[in-house]
Amino acid sequence: MGKICIALANYNGERYLTKMLDSLVAQNRKADIILAIDDGSTDNSPQILKDYQDRLPLQVFRLEKNSGHRAAFSKALEIAKAQLDDDDLVALADNDDIWLPHKLELLEKKIETPSSDQAKPSLVFGDAQIIDANGNVTAESWRMFSKIETTFSTERQIAGINNVTGCVSLFKASLLKKILPIPKGVTVHDRWIAMIAGKNGGIVAVDAPVIQYRIHGANAIGGAPTPSMSKTLETQIQWTKTILSNAQRLSLTEKEVHFANNLLRLTTARLNHGFMPFQLPWIARHRQELFLKDSATVTLKRILFSAVGLPLARKIWKKS
């Protein structure tokens, strides 16, 4: 078997970092390389990382200025690419979670097991328990809590629905050639990685939890407050434009490109128009790609609201 490399992003992680690193020490299957990017921290977390270098195969890289979650992981993966062979494996780590002891062991076994089509997947991902700031378990399944499905659809990823959370994933290092460089327009790095993996070897889900995922009110991504409607629309526009400009890298089909163009037109129109009833047939026809699975009533409400633009939403619901 090849090496396992962990790419860890840290920014001011002093409060939880020690427990995270302890959980890496406690892995049944030890990591061979750990690349920690400190993203311009101003607390004591860089020193904590250095203190663990005699207990873990840990390389620490310090960025002078905070560059953000996506950029920090992109830097870590660039360094990993230079150190790994195609048969090696990569795991992503946040500084505030706790990995269960079997995580690397279980995911490595799964990624080396042929799926139903007799091919080995290029990425596998598990579930997670949810814990609070004090480490108390608040939900046994992140997947159930967030209504995350195990099946992969490129259209759903284009629509901003990501079912592959980076911190519960393990993927083949051979993907790094296609993942990198991560375009600046990518809002969430693990969504981009999932799209690449889905087109290059496929994705397989593991039902068991592999980490304790901490939601504490200051998460960089998961658990963060819901953004405003204007910010959500602007982010979707940026993401869709990035997808279309990288259609060849992503091996998008003509159907997927057509879907992305229609979604971009709809999202752009919602920034400046009121109610757009002419969009309802397309939204209803693509409801499975646009929305999480839910009751018929909730889905109908989502279809109707997706034809409402920001100016009207501001007047009726005081959306910002």
Image (spheres, rainbow, N blue to C red):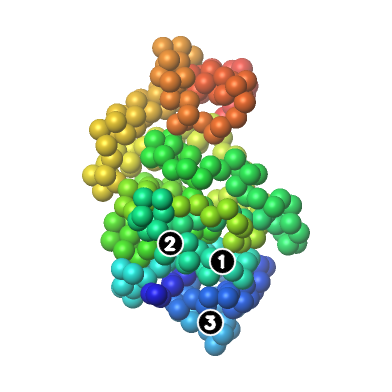
Mark 1 vs 3, N-terminal side: 3
Could you say which quadrant of the image residue 13 lies in? bottom right
Q: Residues within 10 Å of mark 1 (few under 14, many from 20)?
A: many
Q: Is residue 125 left or right of residue 17?
A: left
Residue ID for mark 2: 113
Residue ID for mark 1: 103
Under circle 1, the secondary element is helix
Counting every numbered tag in the picture gives: 3
Mark 1 vs 2, N-terminal side: 1
Mark 2 vs 3, N-terminal side: 3
Q: Choose mark 2 or mark 3, whichever is in front.
A: 2
Give the residue displayed 43% in from the left and 37% down from the top: 156
Under circle 3, the secondary element is loop
| Foreground pick, 194 / 184 | 194
Residue type pointed to by label 3: Leu
Q: Residues within 10 Å of mark 2 (few under 14, many from 20)?
A: few
| Foreground pick, 217 / 243 | 243
Residue 147 visible in the current orientation? yes
Give the residue displayed 43% in from the left and 48% down from the top: 191
Q: Residues within 10 Å of mark 3 (few under 14, many from 20)?
A: some
Residue ID for mark 3: 56
| Foreground pick, 61 / 277 | 277
State if disc 3 and disc 2 touch (CB < 8 Å): no
- Looking at the image, which residue sits at the far bottom? 54
State if disc 2 and disc 1 touch (CB < 8 Å): no
Give the residue displayed 59% in from the left and 40% down from the top: 147
Under circle 2, the secondary element is loop
Estimate the x, y position of residue 290 in percent, counting from the top left: 47, 30
